[in-house]
């Protein structure tokens, strides 16, 4: 049996009395069913160059509907313009466009779109990569002309544009 744990780097404290006690990741022992696991490895995912990432490691072995996935897709443009990716149906993760890290998203909002600058798009074929952590079944990504802002999502409800 293999246990894989994905530890997300979500940020750091930058104020207050706990600034110097800002610990992230696995800071103590790892246990399973009351038994300490030893001899385990940790490594970073190779996202400095998204073109070298074939598939998120956990996506290979995860049961359907469980675990992170890496989705790749492409689209063709006749002309480029600023646009937004509508992430409102996705859970939480990161997006790359043509090899550039576009940003992070999280379904709780308040931002439900990611800005895609025209300069990062190209006439012809474009590649988009999404690392999805919460909703591995999601596979459709749409572009919209205007951002969806200031929408705080409640469980089971899709946000509506203003």
Image (cartoon, rainbow, N blue to C red):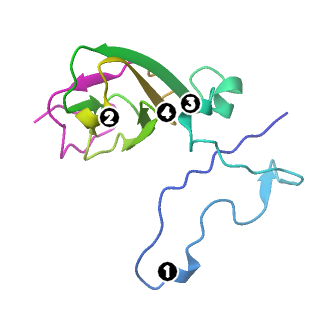
The C terminus - image quarter = top left
Give the SS element for disc 2: helix
The answer to whether the residue labelled 3 contacts the one labelled 4, judged by CB atoms less than 8 Å apart, is no
Looking at the rendering, the stretch of residues picked out in magenta corresponds to 140-162
Q: Give whichever of discs 3 and 2 has the lower sequence position.
A: 3
The answer to whether the residue labelled 3 contacts the one labelled 2, judged by CB atoms less than 8 Å apart, is no
**Could you give the CA–CA distance between mark 4 and mark 1, rounded to whole angstroms?**
30 Å
**Could you give the CA–CA distance between mark 3 and mark 4, rounded to whole angstroms?**
17 Å
- Residue at position x 22%, y 25% from top? 80
Q: Give whichever of discs 3 and 4 has the lower sequence position.
A: 3
- Residue at position x 55%, y 74% from top? 22
Q: Position of residue 47 (x, y in %)?
A: 57, 42
Q: Nearer the viewer, residue 24 or 75?
A: 75
Give the SS element for disc 1: helix
**Could you give the CA–CA distance between mark 3 and mark 1, rounded to whole angstroms?**
36 Å
Q: With respect to residue 105, does 61 lie above or below?
A: above
Q: Give whichever of discs 3 and 1 has the lower sequence position.
A: 1
- Residue at position x 17%, y 31% from top? 160
Q: Position of residue 49 (x, y in %)?
A: 56, 39
**Could you give the CA–CA distance between mark 4 and mark 2, rounded to whole angstroms?**
21 Å
Determine which residue is flagged by label 2.
Answer: 120
The answer to whether the residue labelled 4 contacts the one labelled 1, judged by CB atoms less than 8 Å apart, is no
Determine which residue is flagged by label 4.
Answer: 132
The N terminus - image quarter = top right
- The residue sitting at the right extreme is 39
Determine which residue is flagged by label 3.
Answer: 51
Determine which residue is flagged by label 1.
Answer: 19
Give the SS element for disc 3: helix
């Amino acid at each position: 049996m293999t246990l894989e744990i994905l530890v997300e780097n979500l940020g750091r404290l930058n104020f207050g009395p706990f600034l110097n006690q800002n610990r992230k990741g696995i800071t103590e022992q790892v246990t399973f069913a009351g038994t300490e696991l030893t001899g385990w490895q940790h490594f970073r995912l190779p996202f400095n160059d998204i073109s070298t990432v074939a598939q998120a490691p956990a996506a290979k072995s995860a049961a359907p509907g469980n675990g992170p996935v890496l989705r790749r897709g492409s689209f063709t443009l006749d002309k480029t313009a600023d646009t937004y990716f509508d992430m409102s149906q996705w859970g939480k993760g990161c997006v790359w466009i043509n090899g550039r890290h576009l940003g992070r998203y999280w379904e709780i909002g308040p931002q439900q779109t990611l800005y895609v600058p025209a300069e990062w798009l190209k006439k012809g074929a474009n590649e988009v990569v999404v690392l999805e952590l919460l909703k591995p079944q999601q596979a459709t990504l749409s572009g919209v002309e205007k951002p969806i802002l200031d929408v705080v999502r409640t469980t089971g409800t899709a946000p509506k544009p203003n």
